[in-house]
Image (cartoon, helix red, strand yellow):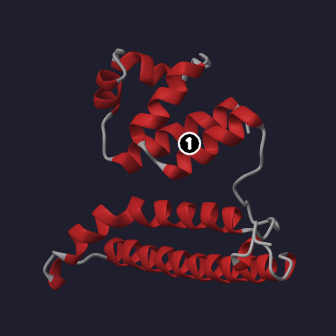
Amino acid sequence: MSIDEIRKDLKDAITRSGYSQSQVAAEMHLSKSNITNWLTSNRDIPLNRLLGVMNYLDDNLFRYQVAEYLCGLKLLSTGKLSVDIPQTRYIETCKEESERLALQNKVNLIFNKPSQLITSKDIEVVKDYLQQLSEETDSQTSMEVSINNLIQQWAMDRPQGGVAYGSYGQS
């Protein structure tokens, strides 16, 4: 992941949070121009500031993106096969949830409009929301299957009478 990608991810995370760049800057004890420069210029984002804004925004998707950027670990699936473990499924579920939540406020406003004021763009936003909701549901189902498979694997890997059965340390 490149610095340009993390700049875009930061901008997206700020948008999802509902905070303005000014609010983020104030919380971080910076000027708004610092945030703007991070998002639009070739200036580096200091590590302590990146971690600080990540914690302030409290956005799981952005946390994983920062982890990928800093550690080079591939945590988020980009359409390729990913390791089928509960942690990976959890990360994918959080990503789907974040994408759906990014549309939540728009959809709430649309739902409260009188039907005669609904535009074709509104309908497309609601369809996109429905798609995100479906993807999130599918991701949750995959996570459930993965967790159940892990539990079965644990049961097969544990010896009879071992820790899993409560007899550890008994003679």
The image quadrant that residue 151 belongs to is bottom right
Q: Position of residue 161 (x, y in %)?
A: 80, 80
Counting every numbered tag in the picture gives 1
Residue shown at the point (41%, 59%) measured from the top left: 102
Front position in the image: 138 or 43: 138
In the drawing, does residue 67 fall left or right of residue 114?
right
- From this viewpoint, is residue 14 visible? yes
Residue shown at the point (45%, 31%) measured from the top left: 53
Q: Secondary structure at mark 1?
A: helix
Residue shown at the point (44%, 80%) measured from the top left: 130
Furthest residue toward left: 114
Q: Amino acid at mark 1?
A: Asp
The image quadrant that residue 141 belongs to is bottom right
Quadrant of the image for the C terminus? bottom right
Residue shown at the point (44%, 67%) measured from the top left: 100
Furthest residue toward front: 171
Q: Position of residue 38 (x, y in %)?
A: 52, 23
Q: Would you place residue 54 above or below residue 58 in this image?
A: above
Q: Would you place residue 127 above or below residue 12 in this image?
A: below
Q: Residues within 10 Å of mark 1 (few under 14, many from 20)?
A: some
- From this viewpoint, is residue 39 visible? no
Q: Would you place residue 103 above or below residue 47 in this image?
A: below
Q: Position of residue 84 (x, y in %)?
A: 78, 71
Residue position marked by numbered label 1 in the rendering = 9
In the drawing, does residue 69 fall left or right of residue 155?
left
Q: Position of residue 44 (x, y in %)?
A: 61, 18
Quadrant of the image for the N terminus? top right
